[in-house]
Amino acid sequence: MKENNILSAYAIAKERFAAVGVNTDAVLEKMSKISLSLHCWQADDVTGFENTGGSLSGGIQVTGNYPGRARNMEELRSDVLKATSLIAGKHRLNLHEIYGDFGGKKIDRNEVTPEHFSGWMQWAKENGMKLDFNSTSFSHPKSGDLTLANPDEGIRSFWVEHTKRCRQIAEEMGKAQNDPCMMNLWIHDGSKEVPASRIKYRRILEKSLDEIFEKKYSNMKDCIEAKLFGIGLESYTVGSYDFYLGYGAKKGKIVTLDTGHFHLTESIADKVSSLLLFTPEIMLHVSRPIRWDSDHVVILSDDLLDLAREIVRCNALDRVHIGLDYFDATINRIGAYVIGSRATQKAFLQALLEPHTLLTKYEEEGKYFQRLALQEEAKSLPWQAVWDMFCLKADVPVGESYIAEIERYEHDVTSKR
């Protein structure tokens, strides 16, 4: 697309949005400050670098075998950098514990240290990227159906120690980047059938969390992530949304909202305003459920738009951390990164372009016809011209031109793996 055409279209769009009280230049400035936390596991299908040869477990499944999967740390880093070169703005990288630099040695998860991630911290610094982190309770001989909620003290204490060490790693990451590292805790613990006592395992999980969070850190932030159910554990999930909501509100922890971890008819957007009242911040894992937690590549859907609008309406961009969480191995993996990231950015751009001041005025004056009419008209305002300008200013491909860039990278790099 020619630059002159982009500039001309933007000038028209700027005038059109100004008519409803929206300053597009200010919106572009806000957009440049929104960072996404890209999930490292899209590049290699949640394989990691433990060198154990084990398969995925704990309800984690990846479908597809598209050629070019990252096979080692160097390839994964190369793919991430390629993806971020096609996404406007400065973004973060979200690592799971199994992506440490273990030097080919067998390091069990209760033995991991910050040293195993010192290379990642250096790499992130060199590439102007900040890191987030996750403990990893799945795909391990001691995972089974229960980890932190396990009544077997040996297994429970193993996972408590693992998670404590992950918090320590996150603290060192935060120190190294002079910005808090978001440390996410998700476990798959549950039961295929209804247990004799639901509260028994939740009491154990509460005890484990209290032990894990006993030590206070200042360079990392704890996030706790719920799930509706897991494959093979359909009847009962220990770490349900209600459990973590209660724990987070009581203990001042950040609750993670994974958009694939709820019933398909639930509105994740509707949860935002309530959480912001009772918990310090929110961590998002943006995914796309087709049939529950199917982890499809994020697209610009009504649900995503609703979620972005709610965050902006709450004036909460500084309290909501936006991460991606999906893994599709049926298509080009770098393409999956870029599609999902740009779709998420488009949702927040549209949210920021909403004529909120005028809508609020109508509402306060009881002019509900006018409010609804403007909400409908706003859907067809020329936001695409503002999006193209956002990409142009960031020196990333405008429109569909990024497709050719990814095809070129596939031809030159990933097809040779």
Image (cartoon, helix red, strand yellow):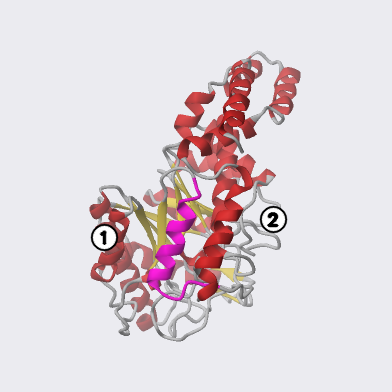
Which residue occupies 38% across, 79% down? 50
Upstream in sequence: badge 2 or badge 1: 1
- In the image, residue 80 lies in the stretch drawn in magenta: yes
Relative horizontal placement of residue 322, taking residue 124 as reference (left or right)? right
CB under 8 Å between discs 2 and 1: no
Viewer-closest of 217 and 36: 36
Query: Does residue 381 show up?
Result: yes
Q: Residues within 10 Å of mark 2 (few under 14, many from 20)?
A: some
Quadrant of the image occupied by residue 209:
bottom left
User: Under tag 1, what secondary structure?
Assistant: helix
Q: Residue at x 31, y 60 (%)?
A: 213
x and y, in percent, of residue 201 in the image: 48, 71
Residue 304 location (% of width, % of height): 62, 45
Q: CA distance from mark 2 to mark 1?
A: 40 Å
Is residue 239 or residue 187 the one in the foreground?
Answer: 187
Q: Is residue 9 above or below residue 311?
A: above
**Amino acid under label 2?**
Leu
**Residue at the spot x=70%, y=63% of the render?**
291
Q: Is residue 287 above or below residue 62?
A: above
Whether residue 206 is visible here, answered yes or no, is no
Above or below 339: residue 69: below
Q: Which residues are magenta?
A: 68-87
What residue is shown at x 40% (from left), y 43% (from top)? 280
Front of the two marks 2 and 1: 1
Tag 1: Cα neighbours inside 10 Å, few (<14), some, or many (≥20)?
A: some
SS at mark 2?
A: loop
Amino acid identity at mark 1: Gln
Residue 309 forms part of the magenta stretch: no
Please tell me which residue lies in front, 288 or 105: 105
What's the mark number on residue 122? 1
Is residue 211 shown left or right of residue 352?
Answer: left
Q: Which residue is mark 2?
A: 264
